[in-house]
Amino acid sequence: MIGSQLHLNIPALFLNVTAVSMIPVSVLLCIALLAYAIVTELYRYHVRLPTLSGPPGFPIVGNLYQLAPDPAETLHQWGKRYGGVYQISLGTRPVVVFNSMQAARDVFVGQGHALIDKPRLYTFHSVLSSVASSIGTTAWSESTKRRRKTAASAMNKPAVASYLPFIDELTKALILELLEQGRGGEMAFDPRQAIASAVTDLTMTVNYGARLPPDEALLSEIIDVEDGLSRIKNPLGSAQDFIPILRLLPFNSQSSKAREVNRRRMVYLRRLERETEQRVEKGVDKPCIQGKCLRDPTVQLDNIDLMSISMSMVSGGLDTMVNTLAWTIGTLAIRPDIQDKAYKAICEAYGSETWAPIEDEHGIPYIDALVKECLRTFSVLRLSLPRAAWKDIQYGDIFIPKGTTVFLNAWGCNRDETVFGSDADAFRPERFLDDPDLPHAAYGFGTRMCAGFHLANRQLYVLLLRLIWSFRIEMSKVPAERIERMRPLEDVAEPFHLAAMPPGYKVRLVSRNLAALSSLLRGNGPCKAQ
């Protein structure tokens, strides 16, 4: 393939030579390609880890093209053959895959400091993130440590409690938007745009101290750019990261797309940071991450650090929250039995005339279990962002040398039958009622797990609590707009996307108690859905 590409790009001057003179050129190209394949294969064999088994690969590419059609599921199935910890080759790079819950917790938590680093990937770190990169993709350093500490302190339990007024306001705004879009259940629609707007509003408030400006074009731009970034951040999304010769191709679409996405991202990030600086200068800013850093001279963060935090905040919610809620709403529409159990639990705790107070974090065990089961079953970040061994790791007979790339297959861990039983593929919230301490891998494990998991859990809990109390969720009556199943393996829209997205659908959100809902949202005023 590479040889034919090079042949086609030979300038016209060379096409005027005789066929005889062309033969040596073709032979030389074949010899060069063969030599390259032999050298890379010898190197791939040399760097394989002797204490780990794994699937055999191919010269030059390793196992890269064997991962289709769904990389996380392929790694999950390989784990059944090669064990909970095994190795694959991406190009010539050896990668250790953790596919078992026990092994993942033993190493990512038990030896967490050994896995604080991140591997360098050409497309993301050299092409896309030429200025700064998000906290979750940045190699470990004192700067990364400061950024993560700042973000984590802004999203720990006490901090999240201080955001409850924002969560309350934005949740009400989302419920009102859903009520009006669906006309109280008369019209079927896709709720994802409204959810994305609400999630973005909250992350903007936490990071910048203000909701997203009333600019639909800006919201659409952020969603579109972050979608492009998710494709690039996917650790398996760019072949040139593992096959260096591909970077030399004259028409490199992967690099050009990455540069364009980065250019567009920097436009809105700089705008949002500029507006925050103006509010701070005028003294009208609200408590937020960026404002605190700008006001406090003891905070040792420069502009690149602040940009990195902003990148993390803006992308995090759109990758995880929106897709988790989209899977959940579709599943609830297909599973009215789960809706009925959840609604009954809410009414038993707080009645049917008002919704639950958001201060009560785990007030309804069934809703808490529902949140955990959604995170486990759908595992929207199926391959957690890759790690690199900061130092040598010894785990039983397995030796992982410093610098080795390590994958946590969250999808595989969340389907570990030794933890979740023979029905690990089933959507069953009751498993977390039976054992509230049952682990899941949706946020990763260890020192560099998702720093915003407290905020994400509280958002999901409040949103599902109020959504189920407000509406009965039903699939559209139009055949082309409805789906009959929501299976996170077979029905994922784009398996090579960083975040697993559900198929498209439309739902009807039928008001359960329109008078009570209208009173809560608007005082005692009229409701447009009537």
Image (tube, rainbow, N blue to C red):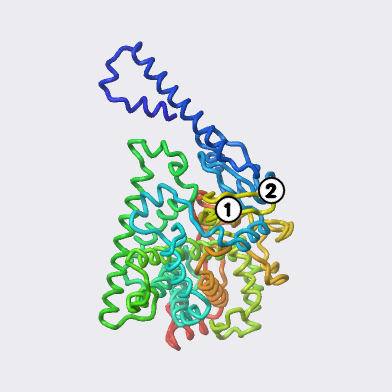
In the picture of the structure, the residue carrying the numbered disc 1 is 392
Do the CB atoms of the residues marked 2 and 1 lie less than 8 Å apart? Answer: no
Q: Nearer the viewer, mark 2 or mark 1?
A: 1
Q: Residue 311, percent across and down?
A: 39, 63
Q: Residue 435, percent across and down?
A: 71, 70
Q: Which quadrant holds residue 338?
A: bottom right
69 to the left or right of 224: right
In the picture of the structure, the residue carrying the numbered disc 2 is 83
Quick check: 367 above or below 223?
below
Front position in the image: 364 or 42: 42
Other-residue count near label 1 (Cα within 10 Å), few / some / many at <14 / 14–19 / ≥20? few
Q: Is residue 502 visible?
A: no
* Amino acid type for the residue under numbered disc 1: Asp
Q: Which quadrant holds residue 365?
A: bottom right
Q: Sequence-wise, which precedes: disc 2 or disc 1? A: 2
Residue occupying the point 48% across, 86% down: 519
Q: Is residue 79 visible?
A: yes
* Amino acid type for the residue under numbered disc 2: Gly
Per the model, the C-alpha gap separating discs 2 and 1 is: 21 Å
Q: Quadrant of the N terminus?
A: top left
Q: Residue 352, percent across and down?
A: 59, 83
Residue occupying the point 71% across, 60% down: 419
Quick check: 36 above or below 400?
above
Q: Secondary structure at mark 1?
A: loop
439 to the left or right of 494: right
Q: Secondary structure at mark 2?
A: loop
